[in-house]
Amino acid sequence: MFSDRYCHMRAANAPSSRNRQDLLWPVYAWKVLYPDERRRSGLNLFQETMLGMIRAGVRDVDELAALMALDPELVRFIIAVQLQPSGWLDVGLRVTKRGERLLDDAEEVRSSLQAGYAFQDAVSGEWIPRFTTQLSEILPTGHDAKNRPFFVLDRDSGRKRNPFVLRDIAPPSLDLDRLLRAHRQYRRDVGAAESEWREVNPEVNFDAIECIADEPIPMYLWCELYRDETGVDRWLISDPFGIRRAVTWLRKPFIELAMGNARLAGLMQRLLPEVAADGLSAQEWVERIEESVNVEISVSHPYLIGETLIRDHLARVLRLTERVESQERTQPEELGALMTESASLIETVLQWLLREWTASPPDWPKNANWSPHEAKAEFATLRIGGAAIDADLVNALAGQSRSVIARAMKMMNQPLKGLLAATLFAAHERDDHPYHEVGSDALQLICLSRLTDYRNKVGGHASGRQADRDEALEYAKFAVHWMALFKRLY
């Protein structure tokens, strides 16, 4: 056994499917200090580090860049666009009184870091985007003849639970950069689950996380493999921490394990008896399952053969649409999922457009902030095929900051409205952009903005707002139609 310690979170949104199998997933639990979300400094890690070095006497840009392992141009950018306009540095690269106060505040915030645990997947070696201050450990009720643990979680029913124990592959490895990325994903997931799909702060926010133990604790997280009753993914793995109903970051390592493990593939076969094994090996059967998810896409949308992400989201939209249309009464959760996948499909297409038709952000002033009036004036200058963009779209996008648009153009990782705004600036710069060929009338870009607004209202767990069936179906069909506008170019 990898460990004799077991962590079980009693999640309120556990999967309801009866066709499921308990799993014990091996992880390394690292003791860390991570930010108390109730308190936050006005500086991100880059800004704080740079100001601290400058206060210590390092004022040469090249020296700052070398000490921080950054490109000198990025250091100049942070100084010119963030530190000086904010009044934290003067023109002589001296820390102002305001900057001094912020540095002192940052020290106070850092002293409020809370002790907890970060988790590294012992199967794939990747960091799991989950943090907790406590380990909710449980003890096995006993062990079977092969020394595998079994549990009785409900003393009233006395039901014995025999989880399948996954084997570890990856050794522990502390990587702070990947740990920070995991923490940012964790914050996004918490925001999506609790606040009507609240979009997290689009500015770069590097949290300070410190590891306070030399060695991690090997342990198992309790999760569940279960049948996807919606028919979208066929099978899912629950979130061990209950923030989401299912998680994608355990899916890939599970597939790789199942391909080489007949017993694990057997668990999946019992959940999915409609997919015949026909004497196939574990790898061949799992490959058949994954291939079957995309058969419809290969037939009806062959032009997407090279665009895996677009294919995946399109498959989910089509299957959810089919399921909703076939039911007399639809659960609110399914309509919310349909809106979520429809918006995700649009986002992946916008990311593809930004990746294939790259463009540089406009040469904006050093102070990247703009007022809604200034934003509307600049958006109004943009053209698609010689025509100005719709006034309603200008108003809908005026809340996007210049920094969000610039990041979307460079990194393609912003929310839908930020990505949409970025494609407009890219189209304005490039005559060969697809928007000019398709035309503003066919693009109906204002519908993209309305779709994401509706998704934000009905897609969250805590919104209390339920989607209208006809409206959700209309938006889903529009998302598929909009994706297909570019089929000649995929």
Image: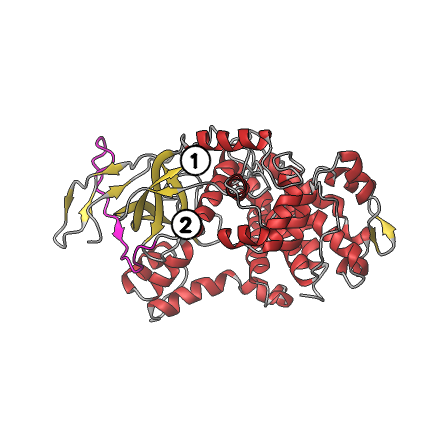
Residue at screen point 56% across, 34% down: 196
Whether residue 117 can be seen here: yes
For label 1, the SS is loop
Residue at screen point 40% across, 33% down: 113
Left or right relative to 417: residue 58: left
Using the image, tell me which numbered label, if any, was put on residue 176.
2
Residue at screen point 50% across, 60% down: 293
Q: Is residue 458 magenta?
A: no
Q: Where residue 465 sits in the image (x, y, percent)? A: 58, 30
For label 2, the SS is helix
Using the image, tell me which numbered label, if any, was put on residue 35.
1
Q: For residue 288, which quarter of the picture?
A: bottom left
Q: What is the spatial separation of the Cα atoms under label 1 and label 2, in whole angstroms?
A: 14 Å
For the image, the number of numbered tags is 2
In the image, which residues are magenta? 152-173
Earlier residue among tags 1 and 2: 1
Left or right relative to 133: residue 295: right
Left or right relative to 149: residue 477: right
| Residue nearest the observer in this picture, 26 or 320 | 26
Using the image, tell me which numbered label, if any, was put on residue 155.
none
Q: For residue 91, which quarter of the picture?
A: top right
Q: Where residue 96 sits in the image (x, y, percent)? A: 60, 33
Q: Where residue 122 sits in the image (x, y, percent)? A: 31, 54
Q: How is the image coloured?
A: secondary structure
| Residue nearest the observer in this picture, 446 or 188 | 188
**Residue type at tag 1:** Pro
* Magenta span main SS: loop
